[in-house]
Image (cartoon, helix red, strand yellow):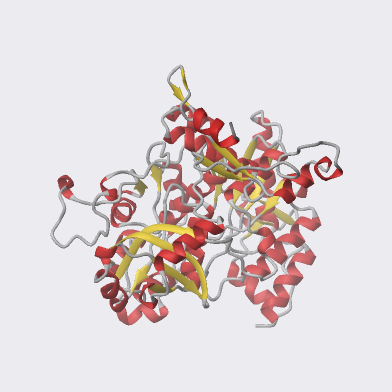
Amino acid sequence: MNFQTYIVLGGLIIYDNIPFFEIYINTSLEICEARDPKTRAGEIKEFTGVDSAYEPPLEPDLILNSGEETEIESIQKVFNFLYEKKILPEEAMYQLCGQPIRQLFEFNKEEQNKLIEEIGNNLNFKIEISEIDLQWIQVLAEGWASPLAGFMRERQYLQCLHFGQIFDLKKKCQINGERKEGDLNCDEEENDGEDQFPMLGPINQTIPIVLPIFDNQANLIKSKLSSKPKIQLIFKNKLIGILKDIEIFPHRKKERIHRQFGHFVEEKEIENGHPGIKLIMESGDWLVGGDLKVFERIIYNDGLDEYRKTPSELKQIFEEKQCDCVFAFQLRNPIHNGHALLMSKTREELLLKGYKNPMLLLHPLGGWTKDDDVPLNIRIKQHLAVLENGIINKEWTILSIFPSPMCYAGPTEVQWHARARLTCGVDAYIVGRDPAGIADNLTGDSLYEPSHGAKVLSMAPALPGLEIIPFQVAAYDKKAGCMAFFDEKRSEDFQFISGTMIRKLAKEGKNPPKGFMPENAWKIIASYYQNL
C-alpha cells in the first residue's frame, strides 16, 4: 500500500461527525534542508524527499506554501478554511483572528500559468492601468480592504456609497433576486451564491475601491460577457494580475462625488479645484468589478520597499515583539515635536491602562497625493531622522508605509484610514485635526470643519474593537521654548506654526523656533523646498 492509498483512506475517515481534511504544507527541498541540515549529512537513511521518494498529495483540501507565507498567514488560512467548512464558529473565529485578512496574491506558478492559458493572447482583454489603479491593486492584494475579493461590484459599491459599510459579499445586485433584462453580470449561476470568505458582521467601508474604464473598453468587454472573459491588468507592459468573474456598471461620477465628498465643483472649476474630484471626473464612465488575482508583490524599486509591510507582516512583527496593544498614527506631512509629544503621551496613557508593551505603528500614507504635498521619499527620510534623534523611541515604534492613494474626502475618508488598520491588528487609532482635509479652492477656508473628522470617527459604525484617540492640539510654547499641548488659559503664550509658515521658512533658508523640530530633520525639509 503506497502513500497515496493511505491518503485516500484518510479521506473516508469520520470521527464524531468531524470530517477528515488533508492539509498539504508545500515546502521546497531547499527550505527543508535549511531547517534540518541532517537531511544531506547522511545521518538519516531513507529520508523522504532525499533518498526516499516523496509523493505529494493529489487533491489536498488546503495548501500552505511554507517559505512563501509567514506563519501568521498560514495560520490565518487554516482558520479561514475551518470557518468555511463550518467547523470553527463565527465568535471563535473573531476571537482567534480578529479582523480576517484576505490577500489576493496568487504565487503558485502552476495556477498563474493556468489563468494565463485560459486567457490566451487575446489583446481585446487587456487594460492598461494607471499608477493610482496599481496602488489600489496593492491595497486589495495585501489585504488592507479585507474582505473584498477585488474591485467592487455594483452591490458592494452601492453599500459603500450609501451606507458607508460592506454588509455582504454577494455578487448580484437585484431586487427580489430577479434577473434584470440586460443585466451585465457575466455569471448567472455562481453569482447567486455568496463568497465564502468569513465576514464577521458588517465592516466600515466609506471609500469606493473601483476600476474605471472608458466607453470603448466597456463596449468591447460587454460584447463578450457571455464567454465569461477574464481581464489582464497591465502596468508599463507588465502583467500585474487578472480580474475574473467580472461585472460592468455605470460610473455615475457626479453622484459618486456628492456622496463621497459631500461637495462638488462646476466643471469650469475642476482644473484648479479639488484634486480628488478632478481625478474622478477625468476617469471613465464605466466601472468594472470582479475577483482579483495578483501574481507578485507590488514593488517600486524606489529605495522604500523595505518599509512597505503587508498587514500579515505587521501582525507577525507585533507578535514577535510581544506587543499587547498597537496604536497607529497616520500622517502625510513631516513630523514635528508636537506630533512626537502626542505619540509619547498616548503610549504613557496606554501603560497606565495596564498594557505592558504598547507599540506605535507610524504609518505615513504612501499612495498618490496632490502635487504640493511633500513627496513620500522626503517624508520617510525626515521620519527616520526624527527616530534617530530619539524624539520618538525606536524601541517601541514600527515605521511602515500605508499604500492607499489619498482622496481628500475629510470625515468620510478618515473612516477608511482607520478601518484599514484593523487588518494589521491595530487596537487604537490617533485621529488629528482636519484629517484627510483640504482647503476650499474658492474661499481658502477648510472645506470640512476641522473637528468633524474626530467626531465622526468616534461615532463611526462597524469598526470592531478599535479605540479612537482624539488628537490633542499642540502648539509652540514661547515661554517654555518647546512644543506643548495648547492651554487656553494662557493662549497668548502659544504660537501655531502652519504648513504655509513652514514652507516659507524653508524656502528662505530660515529656521523654525528652537524645539519645533529636530535640526537634522528640519534640514531635510529645508533642502527639499530650497531645491524645488
Q: Nearer the viewer, residue 416 or 219?
A: 219
Residue occupying image coordinates x 41% and y 72%: 274
Q: Nearer the viewer, residue 94 or 45?
A: 45
Residue occupying image coordinates x 57% and y 45%: 424
Residue 221 shown left or right of residue 404 in the figure: left
Q: Nearer the viewer, residue 128 or 259?
A: 128
Task: Tell me if residue 467 can be seen.
Answer: no
Placement of 366 over or under 442, stated as above or below: above
**Identity of the residue furthest to the top in this view:** 16
Residue occupying image coordinates x 40% and y 62%: 243
What percent of the width, then of the height, locates residue 124? 35, 76
Quadrant of the rendering where the N terminus is positioned: top right
**Identity of the residue furthest to the left in this view:** 181
Quarter of the rendering containing residue 56: top right
Placement of 59 over or under 188, stated as above or below: above
Q: Nearer the viewer, residue 437 or 214?
A: 214
Question: How many discs appear?
Answer: 0
Quadrant of the rendering where the C terminus is positioned: bottom right
Placement of 50 over or under 283, stated as above or below: above
Task: Tell me if residue 355 can be seen.
Answer: yes
Quarter of the rendering containing residue 444: bottom left
Residue 67 shown left or right of residue 435 in the figure: right
What percent of the width, then of the height, locates residue 453? 45, 52
What percent of the width, then of the height, locates residue 394? 76, 50
What percent of the width, then of the height, locates residue 381? 72, 66
